[in-house]
Image (cartoon, rainbow, N blue to C red):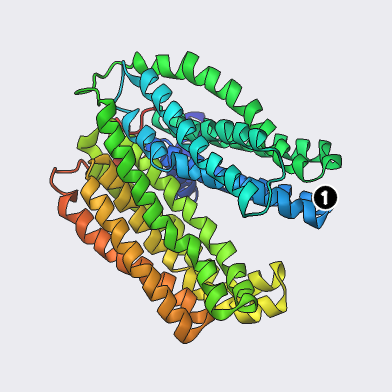
Amino acid sequence: MTNANERSSSARAKLEAVPARRPALRPLGVLASLFRIPLYRSATALVITTGANAGLGLVFWTLAARLYSVEDVGRGAATVAALQLVSMLGCAGLTPALIRFIPPSRLSTRRLVEVTYLAGVSLALLCGAGVVIASYLFIEPLSVPGLVFLAGVAVFAVFTLQDGALIGLRREAWVPVENAAFGAVKIALLIAFSAGGAWGIFVSWSLTTVLIIIPVNLVLFLKFIPAHTQRGRETEREFTLSEMGRFSGANHLSALLMGLPDFLMPVIVLQIAGARENAFFFAAWSLVWPLRLVAVNIANAFTAHAADDESRAGELSIKAGLLVLAIFIPLVAFLVLASHPLLRTLFGREYASNGDIVMRLLAPGLLAYAVVSLGVAMARVRRQLYRLLVLSAIYAAVSLPVSIALVSTYGLGGAGAAWLISQIGLAAITAVIWSRGLFDRPADLTLVEEITPLTSSDDASPSP
């Protein structure tokens, strides 16, 4: 009897000890359960891609500076920049189209990807031919012959578009893998071709692209697309190529309008404030501006998941918004508080003294940029092309004159203030437009249940 009582007391003690341990482990359990939600899992994979590209890109150019002469690095970097520019011009509207139209497609998926690849390569080659002609007539010559450059343009266009195809097929986990492989192989070939001068930089970039797109697209066409086609849930209807063409054209124009003011910002500072001030501005700009890709990738993940089931767009947008707040609020706080030590460590004391105020102004603009990115993604999901173009036109029309006026009046600080004001203004307009249609359908807000490990839901099931 005594042994039985002792065993019973021991069992009660163990049961009482379990809840005592749960509060300490609960945050880890909640965090782990978040990654059971496909939207968050997809966004995490794409955010990791941003970090991997930034880190490996830094290693690539650091090694290039040590292995190649300054002149070779300058010419090689200019040729690679031209390659990226023409790829962006050719594919800017097509990548969002793949992300938007692949999820609901079934039988037409293969044709959709093939036609998009053909259109992207053709547009990029057209832009590339313009760069080649210009290099022979009135700008610095490229580091490689024109035909080699155009071959690099064609393969890099496919490389750019395949990420959109993978995201649309809900294979986001492959995106950081293939981008990490691209960065690692590119570094290895950079070292191998170091005796070749400026052409070695471009060839290492282009040859790596070929080595990556072949296996990725074999898997994409032979495995991922057939698996997507055989998915059980039927789509309401297949979208036509003409609809996709209109969507791509509107997105292309929107991307150019929204990208133009940001790409011109360093040029505006250079022309108005001078080279010295632009160096201080660009140090802060180079740390803050690339982080906008985190917001872009969250928006891309939202687009793919919401496009697969438009009835859940409102629900998913709230989840995406919560993820944006969870990432960008601490990120912005860190950049604002640590701006001076970051600039001093990376660029030196003079850059920290002069660029500190710029970075403090630029950083909060990231949160506003994330709001705009989600608004653009919602417009893409609902194919509201008019709203998309209105947002882009407003940004281009307001941001450029505001930037010129504030830089002219306040110099370096005016540049940071101009970007912040433009982003906040556009975010306010986006929030008004976005919220008008957000609650048209009652959202099934199962976020609390989904992040509870003991509860399952449709969204918590593994993505196909």
* Badge 1 element: loop
- Which residue lies most toward the right here? 195
* Residue shown at the point (72%, 74%) measured from the top left: 348
- Which residue lies most toward the front here? 137
Which quadrant of the view contains residue 329? Answer: bottom left
Q: In the image, residue 168 lies at what x, y percent?
A: 39, 31
Q: Nearer the viewer, residue 180 or 33?
A: 180
Q: In the image, residue 405 lies at what x, y percent?
A: 41, 80
Q: In the image, residue 136 lies at what x, y percent?
A: 64, 47
* Residue shown at the point (31%, 19%) measured from the top left: 106
Three-letter amino acid code of the residue under disc 1: Tyr
Determine whether 365 is above or below 436 in the image.
below
Which quadrant of the view contains residue 120? Answer: top left
Q: Nearer the viewer, residue 371 or 392?
A: 392
Q: Nearer the viewer, residue 441 or 427?
A: 427
Q: Is residue 142 left or right of residue 370?
A: right
Which residue, given by chain and number where applicable, does mark 1 sit on?
68
* Residue shown at the point (31%, 69%) measured from the top left: 425
Q: Residues within 10 Å of mark 1 (few under 14, many from 20)?
A: many
Can residue 82 be seen in the rendering of this structure? yes
Q: In the image, residue 316 lies at what x, y percent?
A: 29, 43
Which quadrant of the view contains residue 453? Answer: top left
Q: Is residue 133 left or right of residue 26?
A: right
